[in-house]
Image (spheres, grey):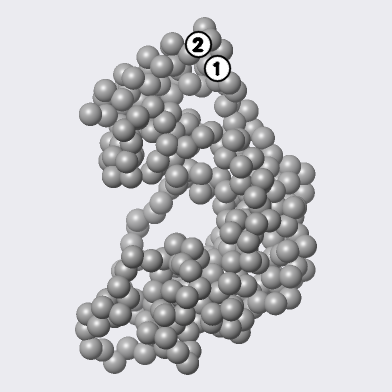
Amino acid sequence: PGLDVARALALLPRTSAHTLVLSSEILIDVAPDRLAQLRDLVSPEHVDVVVYLRRRSAYLHSLWQERCKREPIAGFETYLLRQLQYSHSPNSRLSYKAQLDRLADVFGAAAIQVVNYDTARHEGRDIAELFVEDIVGVPLRATGPKSNAANESLSPESAELLRLLQTDDAGATYDRAGALYRSFERAQGSREFERARRTLHELRDPSPVGIGFVDRLFTGEDREIVENYRIVNSSDQPDLFDPEPGPGRRVQLFQPIGPEGAPQLAKAIEQLRRALR
């Protein structure tokens, strides 16, 4: 939203390429009038909008982990309850149809292409390869060597330790939180990290909890998405996300800590914090 798109486009080198790819995780948050400006600057006649959608239970946990890396945040169980409280609001991260409808108001429903992230992963497809080959239509061998960079998920203990470190940082800023995460990454496997991990595990005893019920709350909405939008890698299922049987996706939730264990965990966290400096 703070980018001068017209100036950025003017700086692009002259080229014979006929496809311009703009990619951002925050495009979904851009106001419709700004999206319309972007559309008119890029190509008023033809813009394809590719949206990756993921099973909501997995998306929520991934989003929470990413926020752990960047800012102080509540534990996952609290975060989950807050998200569910507003889950059917048009501005909710979980209201996929409302997000698609906003894009369709600007670009037209025919311009929207939905990629089912979970189907792609289940079939062993790399999501970037799928985009380049199936949507852009460029053979991957023509795009150069493949990057090995990946945004790996944190282990349950790592995510909770990082969250505690971020939450205890009274002067936290976005830049400081990012620097702390980078130091945290480098410290994994160190003596202080392993001590804090063991202490957390012993005192707060994580247990697996199924959160597949989140996905089942939206089966009706997902059918509407399938009916109204093109699914690039559609399966035979009537729903965008075939509800998983039983508890579905499991996450590790940590038990509340008793007053007798709090000083012990606080000491381990402080020792880890000093090791990160």
At horizontal 62% and vertical 72% (from top left) the residue drawn is 101
- Mark 1 residue crowding within 10 angstroms, few (<14) / some (14–19) / many (20+): few
The picture quadrant where one finds residue 224 is bottom right
Tell me the kind of residue under disc 2: Gly
> From the viewer's perspective, is 233 left or right of 67?
right
Q: Say which amino acid is labelled 1.
A: Ile
Front in this rendered view, residue 148 or 111:
111
Q: Disc 2 on helix, strand or loop?
A: loop
Residue that badge 2 annotates: 261
Q: CB atoms at circles 1 and 2 under 8 Å apart?
A: yes
Image location (x, y in percent) of residue 250: 64, 40
Q: Note whether 231 is above or below 15 in the view shown.
A: above
Residue located 35% across and 56% down the image: 149
Left or right, 117 with respect to 155, comes to: right
Residue 118 position within the rendered picture, expressed as x and y whole percent measured from the top left = 60, 60
Which residue is rendered at x = 46% and y = 67% of the image?
Answer: 30
Q: Which residue is mark 1?
A: 257
Q: How far across and down, in percent of the image, does residue 229 sit?
A: 66, 77
The N terminus is located in which quarter?
A: bottom left
